[in-house]
Image (cartoon, grey):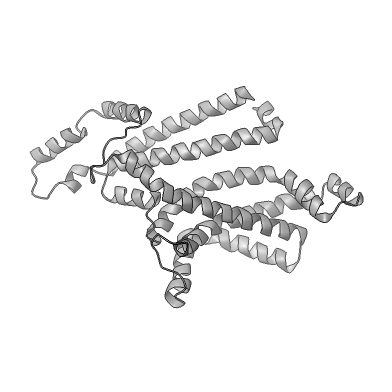
């Protein structure tokens, strides 16, 4: 088990390093911040002096070495636009985004599991048809479209909920619903498919023949054996929700991680973009590493095959 965990940890470090190279190269392909941050009347000499002050005039390998050293020491430079430490700005917005994503993922898991199990147990019933319709609509409609539709109905037309902002529980309802919709549909679809396979197994028939209560057969025997792919899929949805939060936070004016990245990209604030992406990658890789280890603990065949 230790060898498997160390191997997965090494793969995670390589992933983080490759992403650091990728984001470092990509942000420098967007444009020159000297033209955006300096006034139009600035001369080329002024811009060159500005680049030297920010370290952008140094050779690219030197800039990357400085950037990589900063990551290892927890210093990713200062924001070009605000002058504050980029890492502090990213971490300051991370809490709001994690709250939004955490609640959305929890809601998606609860709704998806309940709907998937009910659809499998009541196969062919109206619950199954409603669950299938929910899964199709959920995976066909992008989160930002669902967000705009929810605002149109619940905020503009009926006036029940605020259109955006941050502060009370009411501000959470629409963005959480819009963000959880897609993942809940995927979890429901996967749960139904795996439960249908498990319910046809011989040990499920034997459990019913023994006279075990149906809730024990479904909850203890069937769902437990169908849970492995659901756990892996739910973990992968964390990254999906982080990506979807960029659009959702923009639509609902949510002061989170995604909106910070949009602001940083629009102002060519390299350091903030780099810090935000690296923090996202570290968070995503850490969660997937933990899920991989948990997956191997649940099913020893995985670490033996690896």
Q: Quadrant of residue 60?
A: top left
Q: Quadrant of the C terminus?
A: top right
Q: Position of residue 57 (x, y in %)?
A: 19, 32
Left or right side of 172 for 110: right
Q: Can the viewer see residue 142 in this picture?
A: no
Against 29, is 67 above or below? above
- Left of 99 or right of it: where is 274? left
> Within the image, what quadrant is residue 253 found in?
bottom left
* Res 279 seen here: yes
Q: Please determine whether, in this image, residue 101 is positioned above or below residue 132.
A: above
Residue 285 image offset from top left, x and y in percent: 50, 36
Q: Residue 196 in the image: x percent, y percent?
A: 76, 53
The residue positioned 39% from the left and 57% from the top of the image is: 254
Residue 185 screen position, x and y as percent: 60, 57
Image quadrant where one finds the N terminus: top right
Numbered disc total: 0
- 254 versus 70 height, above or below: below
Is 76 on the left-hand or right-hand side of 299? Answer: left
Residue positioned 50% across, 61% down in the render: 178
Residue drawn at the location 79% of the way across and 54% of the way down: 215
Residue, x 30% and y 40% (percent of image)?
86
Residue, far top: 3
């Amino acid at each position: 088990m230790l060898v498997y965990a160390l191997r997965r940890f090494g793969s995670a470090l390589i992933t983080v390093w490759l992403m650091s190279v990728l984001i470092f190269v990509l942000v420098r392909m967007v444009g020159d911040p000297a033209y955006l941050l300096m006034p139009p009347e600035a001369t080329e000499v002024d811009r060159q002096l500005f680049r030297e002050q920010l370290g952008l005039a140094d050779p690219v390998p030197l800039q990357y070495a400085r950037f990589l050293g900063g990551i290892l020491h927890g210093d990713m430079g200062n924001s070009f636009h605000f002058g504050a430490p980029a890492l502090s700005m990213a971490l300051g917005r991370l809490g709001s985004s994690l709250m939004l994503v955490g609640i959305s993922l929890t809601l998606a898991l609860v709704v998806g599991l309940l709907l998937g199990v009910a659809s499998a147990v009541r196969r062919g019933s109206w619950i199954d048809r409603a669950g299938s319709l929910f899964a199709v609509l959920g995976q066909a409609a992008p989160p930002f479209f669902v967000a705009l539709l929810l605002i149109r109905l619940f905020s503009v037309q009926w006036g029940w909920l605020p259109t955006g902002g941050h502060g009370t529980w009411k501000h959470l309802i629409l963005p959480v619903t819009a963000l959880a919709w897609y993942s809940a549909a995927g979890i429901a679809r996967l749960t139904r498919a795996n439960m249908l396979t498990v319910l046809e197994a011989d040990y499920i028939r034997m459990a019913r023949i023994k006279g075990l209560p149906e809730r024990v057969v479904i909850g203890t025997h069937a769902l437990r054996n169908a849970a492995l792919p659901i756990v892996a899929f739910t973990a992968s949805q964390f990254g999906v929700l982080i990506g979807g939060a960029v659009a959702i936070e923009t639509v609902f004016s949510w002061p989170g991680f995604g909106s910070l990245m949009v602001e940083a990209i629009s102002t060519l604030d390299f350091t903030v973009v780099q810090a935000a992406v690296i923090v996202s990658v570290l968070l995503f890789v850490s969660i997937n590493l933990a899920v991989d280890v948990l997956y191997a603990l649940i099913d020893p065949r995985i670490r033996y095959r690896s």
